Image (spheres, rainbow, N blue to C red):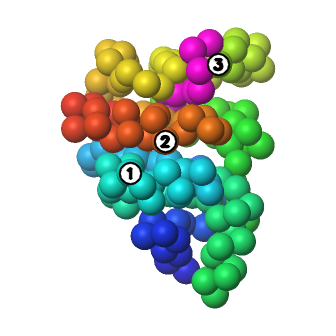
Amino acid sequence: MGPVVIEDIPVTGFADASALFTHAVVLMDQPGQKLMTYVNVHVANTAWHNPRLKKILQQADIVYPDGAGIVWASKLLGAPLPCRLEAAGWVFDFVSFMAAHQKTVYFIAGEPGVAQKALTIIEKRFPHHTIIGIHHGFILKDPALRQQGSVGIYCPGGEIGPPHTISFGRNRPTLSGR
């Protein structure tokens, strides 16, 4: 099944989080930059009024459904997505999966301090993690993002997700990670 287009945004469904992770690793092994992000009702509504955000979402390599509202919309459109993939439910599995596949992760998370709190928890639970940096997500100037090699980017954000996506999309041409 190909992506379901919701509000002009192609949304790819996955059977579960593990399938999303596997797809991300396959993409990361291909040359060039890759953008994996999410869409929920808030992001879709914001993109409806923000052409820059909509364009970034339309050009992303993976846009996964981060909420029941998107899954519900896909059912109304006659092309049901299998499930919602809210990052809060799989973040630790994601970190573990990426480490097992020797892929690095750069955390972009919420308000200032949120990423640091997440990293503190991850360092205790996964001492061999592959996180190469963290940021609150509004200014992407960390040199770790320009490091060669595959970089997985996890972008939780809830109500402040769209600024992260716009900031990353604006800076994407200058980043060398995948």
For the residue pair 68 and 41, the one nearer the viewer reads as 41
Determine the residue positioned at 75% across, 17% down. 121
In the current view of this chain or complex, which residue is farthest to the front?
A: 49
The residue at which mark 3 appears reads as: 114
The residue at which mark 2 appears reads as: 162
Name above or below for residue 111 compared with residue 14.
above
**Horizontal side of residue 121 vs 53, given as left or right:** right
Q: Position of residue 172 (x, y in %)?
A: 29, 37
The residue at which mark 1 appears reads as: 50
Q: Dots 3 and 2: beta carbons under 8 Å? A: no
**Horizontal side of residue 90 vs 100, given as left or right:** right
Amino acid marked by disc 3:
Val
Cα gap from disc 3 to disc 1, whole angstroms: 26 Å
Within 10 Å of disc 3 (Cα), the crowding (few <14, some 14-19, many 20+) is some
Q: Earlier in the sequence, mark 3 or mark 1?
A: 1
Determine the residue positioned at 45% across, 35% down. 163
Within 10 Å of disc 1 (Cα), the crowding (few <14, some 14-19, many 20+) is some
* Residue 16, visible in the rendered structure: no
Which portion, as a residue range, is magenta?
105-113
Amino acid marked by disc 1:
Asn
Q: Nearer the viewer, mark 3 or mark 1?
A: 1
Q: Earlier in the sequence, mark 1 or mark 2?
A: 1
Q: Quadrant of residue 120?
A: top right
Q: Dots 1 and 2: beta carbons under 8 Å? A: yes
The answer to if 106 sits in the magenta stretch is yes
Q: Nearer the viewer, mark 1 or mark 2?
A: 1
